[in-house]
Image (spheres, rainbow, N blue to C red):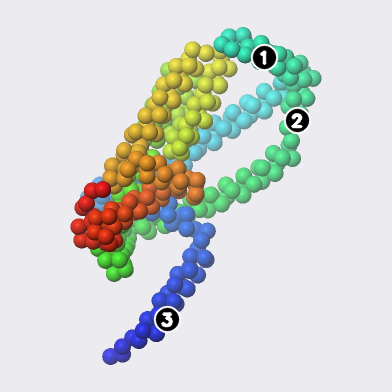
């Protein structure tokens, strides 16, 4: 039996590091897709367990869940795109009519609580006559629009490719979930001992909490905002509620949708409805963003409120939308390491994982 020398061990470690770095470099473009697939796999785990009890065929369960994720993305996106096309056609027709006939000062300008005379003067100067409206809308740089549309098309194609690859990876993650988890646990234990398993569980719990706090609360918030918009008389309440659900996932994203809803109400002259919708909407957003969402994300990992916010906001700032889920997971792992260090003076002590800060 041959014995491995120290030189061979070091050479093997260097070779493994080089191969890992090369693999990461080659697949760098698809790392976000793999991470998204991991987040989705963790998020649908309760549904996977429920289906597995009734359909003891991993391939079928994985296919059904992957199809479900596809439909959850495609159905709202199709509704949003079809409505956007209709609105774009209406906007183009309105601009053409405005350039030909001008835009009279609307009645709601006189009902503004402040700035009515200034708005009326600006509107009369820039939009009221056909000549002024044609000059104002003529400032639109159509070559700039064409260049932006080309960049948008490239970005859209790239997003579609990444999403398709995410679904492929998600299918295999769900189908081979048990084998993958066993390999990860064994690898973490061999590399880091018991601390590796605890870190893995902490990261898993943080991602689950982030999915619940972002996606589920976003869905609930979208439904509540759609109801609020419908009662407030906001045009297209279902579409704006759909946008609210997606926007609420991003910190401060709902504020943009609320501003759009308020502008639509003001354009109708419904000043009081705009005040009511704005007050209730921003109060609801404040409670969810500052209390419900951090407690739901941090409650599963005993992660302090401030670290939840740093993880969410810092993650979005650093790596975009994916950071909503990766950021809290990284902060949860950091806090666990700190607790173990404070408890035992070493990372990975036997009792550290059970010690409160």
Which percent across, then down, holds residue 325? Answer: 40, 47
Residue 66 in view here: no
The outermost residue toward the right is 131
**Residue at the spot x=53%, y=18% of the render?**
265
Report which residue position mark 3 lands on: 11
Question: Between residues 179 and 2, which one lies in front from this camera angle?
Answer: 2
**Residue at the spot x=40%, y=41% of the render?**
309
Sequence-earlier tag: 3 or 2? 3
- Quadrant location, the N terminus: bottom left
Instruction: Please rate how many residues cluster around mark 2, counting C-alpha atoms within 10 Å: few if below 14, some from 14 to 19, many from 20.
Output: few
The outermost residue toward the bottom is 1
Instruction: Please rate how many residues cluster around mark 3, counting C-alpha atoms within 10 Å: few if below 14, some from 14 to 19, many from 20.
Output: few
Report which residue position mark 1 lands on: 118
**Disc sitting over residue 216 in the figure:** none
Distance between mark 3 and mark 1 Cα atoms? 76 Å
Circles 3 and 1 in contact, beta carbons < 8 Å = no
Residue 221 in view here: yes
Q: Is residue 117 left or right of residue 339?
A: right
Q: Is residue 290 above or below residue 263?
A: below
**Residue at the spot x=42%, y=74% of the render?**
16
Q: Is residue 310 above or below residue 63?
A: above
Q: Which of pointers 1 and 2 indicates the residue nearer the eye? A: 1
Question: Between residues 302 and 112, which one lies in front from this camera angle?
Answer: 302
Residue 190, image quadrant: bottom left
| Dot 1: element | helix
Which percent across, then down, holds residue 14? Answer: 44, 76
Report which residue position mark 2 lands on: 139
Which percent across, then down, holds residue 347? Answer: 29, 61
């Amino acid at each position: 039996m041959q014995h491995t020398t120290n030189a061979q061990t070091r050479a093997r470690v260097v070779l493994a590091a080089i191969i890992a770095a090369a693999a990461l470099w080659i697949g760098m473009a698809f790392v976000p897709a793999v991470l998204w697939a991991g987040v989705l796999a963790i998020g649908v785990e309760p549904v996977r367990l429920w289906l597995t009890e009734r359909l003891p065929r991993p391939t079928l369960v994985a296919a059904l869940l992957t199809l479900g994720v596809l439909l959850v993305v495609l159905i709202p996106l199709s509704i949003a795109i079809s409505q956007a096309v209709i609105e774009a056609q209406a906007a183009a027709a309105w601009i053409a009519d405005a350039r030909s006939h001008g835009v009279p000062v609307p009645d709601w300008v006189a009902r503004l609580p402040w700035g009515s005379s200034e708005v009326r003067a600006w509107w009369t100067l820039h939009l009221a006559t056909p000549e002024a409206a044609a000059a104002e809308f003529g400032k639109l740089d159509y070559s700039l629009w064409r260049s932006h549309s080309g960049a948008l098309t490239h970005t859209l194609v790239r997003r579609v490719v990444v999403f398709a690859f995410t679904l492929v990876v998600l299918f295999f993650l769900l189908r081979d979930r048990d084998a993958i988890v066993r390999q990860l646990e064994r690898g973490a234990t061999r590399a880091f001992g018991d601390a590796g398993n605890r870190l893995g569980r902490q990261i898993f719990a943080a991602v689950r909490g982030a999915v619940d706090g972002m996606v589920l609360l976003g869905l609930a918030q979208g439904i509540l905002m759609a109801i609020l918009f419908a009662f407030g008389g906001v045009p297209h309440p279902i579409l704006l509620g759909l946008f609210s659900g997606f926007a609420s996932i991003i910190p401060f994203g709902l504020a943009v949708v609320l501003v759009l809803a308020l502008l639509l109400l003001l354009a109708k002259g419904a000043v009081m409805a705009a005040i009511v919708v704005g007050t209730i909407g921003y109060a609801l957003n404040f409670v969810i963003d500052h209390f419900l969402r951090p407690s739901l994300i941090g409650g599963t990992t005993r992660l302090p409120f401030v670290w939840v916010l740093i993880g969410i906001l810092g993650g979005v700032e650093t790596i975009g939308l994916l950071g909503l889920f990766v950021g809290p997971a990284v902060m949860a792992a950091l806090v666990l390491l700190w607790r173990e260090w404070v408890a035992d003076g070493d990372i990975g002590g036997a009792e550290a994982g059970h010690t409160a800060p």
